[in-house]
Amino acid sequence: MRRVGLLTSGGDCQALNAVMRGVAKALYNNYDDVEIIGFKDGYKGLIKGDYIKMEPEGFSGLLMRGGTLLGTSRQPFKLMKVIEADDVDKVTEMKKNYKSLKLDCLFVLGGNGSQKTANLLSEEGLNIIGLPKTIDNDLYGTEMTFGFHSALAMATAVLDNIHTTAASHGRVFIVEVMGHKVGWLTLYAGIASGADIILIPEIPYDIRVVTGAINERTLQGKKFSILAVAEGAISKENAKLAKREQKEKIKNRKYPSVAYEVGAQIAELTGQEVRVTVPGHMQRGGTPTPFDRILSTRIGAKAVRLYKEREFGKMVAVLGDEITSIPLAETAGRLKTVDPKASIIKEARSIGICFGDK
């Protein structure tokens, strides 16, 4: 009897269950003697030895079910080798539980930090295969991550719905979009929903350029303006500061988030009525889109192909229409950001979208 492990780590997304289903179906289709061990709450379950034996029927109906049936948690990579107050050596415990369960492979569904830990375990001699999960789409080495498309649909729906109330009241509306340190989700949702101004971390903004664009729309007879603002958006002034100074300034900011700060500045400089909407974790919830269901199935199947070919220490990756793989060492600790000179930025500018920089 061969035995493999599954865990879902980091922030949740709509397609985690769909990917687990893809892995399970491919395993059961290729092997008659396979047993799947599911670790509860991500790496926390692997550390504590908290797991369940998963049965084939348990994967039925997961394709369209959001979230993760195994649960998830964040275990910061920077603390993985740190022995804290509980006196637990996390890496040693993970290795011990992997070996005591006689696992032949561990499939890790996660984003940046999760794949860094996956690479660490691979370097420690465990058979690891990573699967690229994050709504942020910021994993280096893959063009697309599962969860991104579904989160995009949710963020776009919020911006779409804002249009009607913005038009009715003649206000400036700001929608704060998730994405952590990158602007992929905000950029795509902003373009998809017809936002007038898009602010992303990769293109620091000047608030006077932003208000200038709003005033110009007002002069053109436009009754409202809609801004898609990334949660990690940063002003040109703050972008010049050292990282430590940036963190300190954010910590002491009198507003709940950057969207509220931008909103207050717009109200002060333009005199216009401003409303801020923060959909937050709604963007992670709901059911996966058809695109994500297909992508998740393909990623799961590819992960099992890597397992079958004994290609460990790799992460499944998307390249064009092909599902391929890259070494975990190549993606670990690297962020995929939006290139300010990318064609999609140029195309957005050409239709009049303002990025707040010029």
Image (cartoon, rainbow, N blue to C red):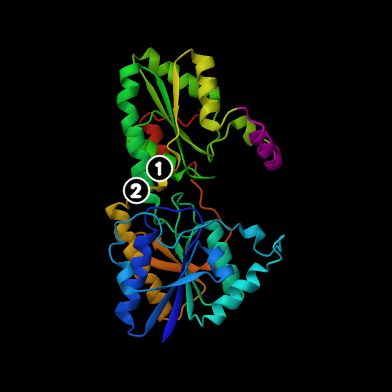
Location of residue 218 by image quarter: top left
In this picture, residue 353 sits left or right of residue 330 = left
Marks 2 & 1, CB-CB < 8 Å contact: yes
**Residue 29 appears at what percent x and percent y?**
29, 78
Front residue of 238/163: it is: 163
**Residue 301 appears at what percent x and percent y?**
34, 70
- Residues drawn in magenta: 242-254
For the stretch drawn in magenta, what is the main secondary structure? helix
Is 267 one of the magenta-colored residues? no
State the CA–CA distance, disc 2 to disc 1.
8 Å
Q: Report the quarter where the N terminus lies.
A: bottom left
- At label 2, counting other C-alpha atoms closer than 10 Å, the crowd grade (few under 14, some 14-19, many 20 or more) is some
Q: Residue 282 shows which numbered tag?
A: 1
For residue 272, above or below residue 10: above
Q: Amino acid at mark 1?
A: Met
Q: Amino acid at mark 2?
A: Gly
The answer to whether residue 329 shows anywhere in this view is no
Q: Which residue extends farthest bottom?
A: 1
Location of residue 64 by image quarter: bottom left
The answer to whether residue 40 shows anywhere in this view is yes
In this picture, residue 207 sits left or right of residue 185 = right
**Residue 61 appears at what percent x and percent y?**
28, 62
Q: Residue at x 54, y 24 (%)?
A: 207
For residue 193, above or below residue 180: above
Per the image, the residue denoted by label 2 is 286
- At label 1, counting other C-alpha atoms closer than 10 Å, the crowd grade (few under 14, some 14-19, many 20 or more) is few
* Mark 1 element type: helix
